Image: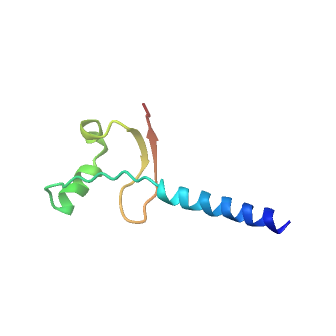
C-alpha cells in the first residue's frame, strides 16, 4: 500500500512541475502620447467610440468616478 501512495505522490509532483513549466503568458503594451486628461476626454465620449473601439456598441449610464454603466458589446 505504501508503494502506491508513493507512486501517486510522485505522479502529483510531476503534474505540478509540468503545469508550472508549461505556463504561458501573453502581454501587450501601447504607449499613448497624450495626457491623462486627453485620454479621459476620448474614452468618455461615446460618440467617438466607433473611431477607435469596435467592441462597445452602446452604453447606458454616466462616466466618472464611482459611476455605474452598462456597456453593450459586439464580439467577432
Residue 46: where, in percent of width, then height? 31, 44
Q: Nearer the viewer, residue 2 or 58?
A: 2
Viewer-proximal residue among 64 and 8: 8
Q: Residue furthest front?
A: 3
Q: Which residue is at 24% across, 37% downward? A: 51
Residue 66, given in percent of the width and then of the height, sits at 43, 65
Does 43 sit left or right of 67 as displayed?
Answer: left
Q: Position of residue 34 (x, y in %)?
A: 14, 57
Residue 37, given in percent of the width and then of the height, sits at: 20, 61
* Image quarter of the C terminus: top left
Q: Which residue: 16% across, 61% down?
A: 35
Q: Can you say whether 39 is above or below 58 in the image?
A: below
Q: Is 19 in front, or is 10? A: 10
As drawn, which residue projects farthest toward the right?
A: 1
Q: Residue furthest left?
A: 33
> Horizontally, is 26 left or right of 5 in the view?
left
Which residue is outermost to the bottom? 2
In this orientation, which residue lies closer to the viewer: 16 or 4? 4
In the rendered view, tell whether residue 15 sits above or below residue 57: below
Q: Quadrant of residue 7?
A: bottom right
Q: Which quadrant: the N terminus? A: bottom right
Residue 14 falls left or right of residue 72: right
> Residue at left 54%, top 56%?
18
The colour scheme applied to this rendered structure is: rainbow
Picture quadrant of residue 53: top left
Amino acid at each position: 500500500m505504501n508503494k502506491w501512495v508513493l507512486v501517486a505522490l510522485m505522479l502529483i509532483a510531476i503534474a505540478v512541475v509540468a503545469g508550472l513549466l508549461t505556463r504561458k503568458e501573453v502581454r501587450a503594451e501601447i504607449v499613448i502620447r497624450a495626457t491623462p486628461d486627453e485620454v479621459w476626454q476620448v474614452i468618455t465620449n461615446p460618440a467617438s467610440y466607433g473611431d477607435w473601439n469596435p467592441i462597445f456598441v452602446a452604453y447606458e449610464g454616466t462616466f466618472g468616478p464611482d459611476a455605474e454603466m452598462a456597456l453593450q458589446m459586439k464580439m467577432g
